[in-house]
């Protein structure tokens, strides 16, 4: 059974920092592309940051230079370090695990349950 368990969310003042963690089990973590998505009330879920199995990263323009995604394959965990947080970063943050399907096999993406991040004074 695949599980992605997020932690680290909470309430923080503007300009503050939080570090999200996502612990994965039931998958070969090292070969999965890991991502963080977020969904604010009334908005669609959007990609925040992703890291490939090889360590390449990409970020949404809105979080570049403020957020950093990293992974620890030995601990099956992906992190999102969030600095200089803004009220518009308020959302539920979801961890995602994905891998490319082949012609013979479909690999579904997996999602965590989400963790709330609220940036407010």
Image: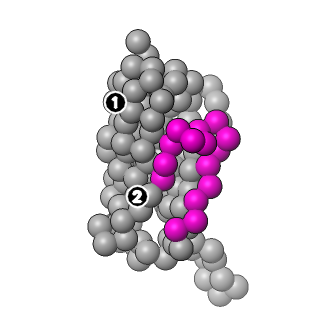
Which mark is first along the chain, 2 or 1? 1
Colouring style: one colour
Q: Which mark is residue 26?
A: none
Could you say which is closer to the camera, residue 10 or residue 63?
A: 63
SS at badge 1? strand
Residue placed under numbered mark 1 in the picture:
10
- Most distant residue in the left direction: 75
Q: Is residue 1 visible?
A: no
Residue found at the far bottom of this picture: 104
Give how far across and how far down residue 10 sits, in percent: 34, 30
- The answer to whether residue 41 is left or right of residue 83 is right
Q: Are marks 1 and 2 in contact (CB under 8 Å)?
A: no
Q: Is residue 64 above or below residue 41?
A: below
- 66 inside magenta stretch: yes
Q: Is residue 68 visible?
A: yes
Compared across the picture, whether 47 is left or right of 92 comes to: right
Q: Please tell me whether residue 98 is drawn above or below residue 43 in the rendered image.
A: below
What's the CA distance linking mark 1 and mark 2?
Answer: 18 Å
The structure residue drawn at horizontal position 45% and vertical position 35%, both measured from the top left corner, is: 83
Q: Residue at x 40, y 27 (%)?
A: 16
Nearest the viewer among 19 and 111 is 19
Q: Residue at x 62, y 55 (%)?
A: 58
Position above or below: 26 against 83:
below
Give the image location of residue 53, x and y in percent.
Answer: 52, 72
Q: Of the numbered discs in the image, which one, if any, rests on residue 78?
A: 2
- Label 2 Cα neighbours within 10 Å, binned few <14 / some 14-19 / many ≥20: many
- Residue bounds of the magenta highlight: 55-69
Q: Is residue 42 magenta?
A: no
Q: Position of residue 109 (x, y in %)?
A: 55, 63
The local secondary structure at tag 2 comes to strand
């Amino acid at each position: 059974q695949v599980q992605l368990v997020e932690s680290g969310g909470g309430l923080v003042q503007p300009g503050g920092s939080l570090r999200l963690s996502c612990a994965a089990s039931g998958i070969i973590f090292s070969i999965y592309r890991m991502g963080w998505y977020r969904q604010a009330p009334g908005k669609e879920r959007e990609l925040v940051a992703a890291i490939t199995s090889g360590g390449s990263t990409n970020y949404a323009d809105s979080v570049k230079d403020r957020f950093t995604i990293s992974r620890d394959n030995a601990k099956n965990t992906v992190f999102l370090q969030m600095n200089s947080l803004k009220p518009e970063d308020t959302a539920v943050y979801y961890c995602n695990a994905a891998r490319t399907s082949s012609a013979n096999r479909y690999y579904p993406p997996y999602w965590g349950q989400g963790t709330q991040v609220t940036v407010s004074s």
